[in-house]
Amino acid sequence: MKYLKLKYGLLAVVIIGTTLLSCKSASIEQQEGKFTNYLFTYFTGNGPGEEAIHYAISKDGYNYQALNNNQPIIDSKKISSSGGVRDPHILRGADGKTFYMVVTDLYVPEQGWNNYAMILMKSTDLINWSSSIVNIPQTYPKEFSDIKRVWAPQTIYDKETDQYMIYWSMLGDEGRDIIYYAYANKDFTGLSSVPKQLFYSPSNSACIDGDIIYKDGMYNLFFKNESSGGGIRKAVSDKLTEGYVQQEGFFDQTDAPVEGSGIFKLIDSDEYILMYDMYTSGKYQFTKTKDLQNFSIVDNDITMNFHPRHGTVIRITENETQALIEKWGFLGKGSFLGFNSTHVKKNNVVVNDDDNTIYIPVNLGTDIKKFDPEMKTVSWVSISATGVNDFTKGAVNYTIVSGSKQKTYKVIVKEDNNPVLNGFYADPEIIYSQKTQKYYIYPTSDGFKNWSGTYFKTFSSDDLIHWKDEGVVLDLKKDVSWADRNAWAPTAIERKIKGEYKFFYYYTAAQKIGVAVSDSPTGPFVDLGKPLIASKPEGANGGQEIDPDIFIDPVSDKNYLYWGNGYMACVELNDDMVSIKENTLKILTPDKTFREGTEVFYRNGIYYFLWSEDDTRSPNYRVRYATSKSPAGPLEIPKDNLILVKDAEHGIYGTGHNSVIQTPNSDVWHMVYHRFNRPNGIDMGNSAGFNREVCIDKLEFKPDGSIIPIKPSLSGIK
C-alpha cells in the first residue's frame, strides 16, 4: 500500500474497509438518475512526462474539458516502478461510491515497449488514491517468469462471485499477446488468483486492449486484433470469464490504425459511445450505437481542449463533479477554450500564466479600436469583460472567475501577418504567374502525424499579404497511381511553351519525386504516371529522394532540377520539363551542414543556393547559403553563410525550408519559410516537426551581393 504525496501537498489516503458487500445499499443502477456529467481519464503521449493520469470532464459525453490545466492529477513516479503509467481504466464500484483504477506500469522513453507490472488503485472520492504495484513475473515466477509485456488492464465487477475481475494482455518470450484475467483481493492491493486466459482467438491472433460491457444478458468484449488485418473486434459470451465467441468483422469505423477502445453508456439514454485511439493519426474517434453492433461516427460533435491517448470514461454525479472542479479547476491557460473572432489567428494566441498576459494576434486590417476577441472558457469559469474593447491604447484587463477564485490577465491585441496562411503548412514554394499576375504558395499540408499527409493545396495572392485558399491541386490517393503516402515539399514553375502557359509541379511522394502538369496555377494537375526520380543518384551516400526545386536559368534558358536529403543532386531537364537530359547529373552537396530543402535563384550575375541545416523537428532548424557562377556549380561557401535562425526571445523556432520570390520589375525580394507553431511548438517535442506554419519576411543584400541575415518576425511584411 502507498500513501501519495501529490503535486499539491501530502494527502491522507483513507482506505475503506476490506469487505466488499454483496448487498449494496446504493447500487449503480439506483444512482442512474443522479449522474449528470462524465469523467474522462487518459494519458497524453510517449514522451517524457506524458505517461501520467489526466482528468477531463463533460456535461454531455461529447464535449470534454481538461482539469488541472491538462497536467497530471497524480505523480507517476510516486505510484509506479517505471516512472510512467498508461492506459488508465476507471470503474465505479458496485456499491456506487468506491472507485477502482488500473493502469499499465510503463515508461516508454526508458523501457521501450516491454514492461512487467500493472498498478491497482482505489479511491472513495476520485481525488485521493491508494495504489499497489503488481509485478507479474515476481508474483507468479512459476507460471509467468518469461512475461515481457503487461498491458492495458481493466476492471469489471463479477456479480456472481462478488469480486472484481481484472483483465489485461500479456506476452511472453514466445507466442503472441493474449488477454488474461484474475480476481483482485478484497482490498484491491493485489491478485487473489493465478491469471487464466480469458479469450481464445480463432485465428490465433495477438489480442490487446480488452474492454468489456454487459448488455442484455451478454458480456461484450471489445479488443484490438494486432494481426489478421488489425482493428477493433468483438467477442460475446453469457459468462464473464469464459465462452467468448468472436463476431464477424471489425467495429472501428476507420482504415487508420487504432487501439485502446473504450465504451460507455450515455446518461438517460439507450445509446452508447465506443471511442478509440487513432494513435498514428494523433486523434480520437467517437462512434455511437444502440445495439453494440452498428456504429456511426460522431466526430463532428466532439470537442476536446487536449489530445488524449488510450483512456476511459465513467458517469459521475454533480457533487463529484463539483469536488473535482474545486480540487483541479484551476484558473489559467487551460481555462480558455478559444478566441473565436474570425479576425484572430487562433493557432497563435499566447496565454502566459507567468506574467498573466494574453497576446492575441489578428489579421491585418482588423479594427482593434472596436474589437471583441470572443473568448470562450471552460464550463466552470466565467469572464468579466465581454464585448467590444479598445486595444489601440494598450492592454485591456480581463478577469476570469471560478467560485471564490479569480485571476486577471492583461490582454494585448496586435496585427501580425506571420503566419501568412491559416493552419499548419510547411516547406513552402512560391512563384509569380505572368498568366494571372498573382503569387502562389505551394506548401506541404502539415498537421499530420509523422508527415503522413496525402494531398497538396495552393494559395493565391495579389500582394503577398492577403492569401486565398485555392483548394487541393493534387491528391495522391486520387490523382497518382504510383504512390499514396508522404506528400511533401513541392516546387512549381510557369513555362511558356508554343505560346501557351504551362505549369509544372514537382513533388515528393513515398520518398520519390514526381511531376504533374496543368494549364492553370491552381490545377488540376495531371501526373506523369510514374516517378521522375525513383532511386538514389550515383555518388550519393544515404539520405532520401525528397525536396525537389525547379529553376529556369535566365541566362541560358535551361531547366534544372535539384533534390535530396543528405545530398544535393542536380540534373538538367529536357525542353518537355518532364524528362531528364542524359549525362547531366551532378552532386553539389556543399558541406556537412547540408540536410535538405535546396532553393536556387539568380540575382545580378550570382546564382544563390540555399539549404536547411539540422532536423525539421529541431528548434535549431535553420538556413545557410552558397553562391556560384553557374546553375550547376561548383559552389562557393561564404564565411558567414547562416541567414535564418530561431529567435527564442520572441518564441520563434524551427525556421527553415524556404523559397525565395522577386517582386516583378524590381529588386525587392522576400523569403518564404516555415517555423514551429507559435507558441505551442517548442513544447510539442518531435511533433513540432509536423505542426508548422508558413511565414514571409523581407530578403535583403549587401552591395557585394552577400545576403543580410533575416530576422524572423511576428509582424511579417506590410
Image: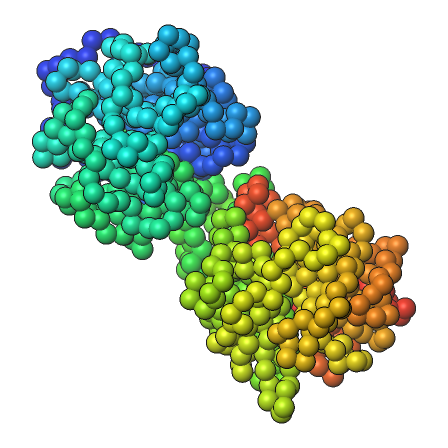
* Quarter that holds the C terminus: bottom right
Farthest right residue? 704
Viewer can see residue 504: yes
Question: Looking at the image, which residue sits at the far bottom?
Answer: 499
**Which residue is depicted at the point 40% across and 40% down?**
308
Rendering quarter of residue 148: top left
- Left or right of 271, for residue 542: right
Q: Check the image and report above or below for 562 versus 292.
A: below
Instruction: Provide residue 13's location: percent of width, then percent of height.
Output: 36, 14
Residue 395: x %, y % from top left: 56, 54
Q: Is residue 61 left or right of residue 497?
A: left
Q: Residue at x 59, y 75 (%)?
A: 504
Front residue (pair 651, 178): 178
Task: Please determine whether, in this image, residue 678 is positioned above or below residue 586.
Answer: above
Which residue shows up at 49% across the image and 69% down it?
474
Image vertical order of residue 555 relative to residue 622, above or below: below
Residue closer to the observer: 708 or 146: 146
Q: Quadrant of the N terminus?
A: top left
Q: Viewer-proximal residue, 450 or 11? A: 450
Residue 78 seen from this side: no
Image coords of residue 608 (percent x, y)? 79, 66
Tell me what residue is drawn at x 67 percent, y 50 percent. 543
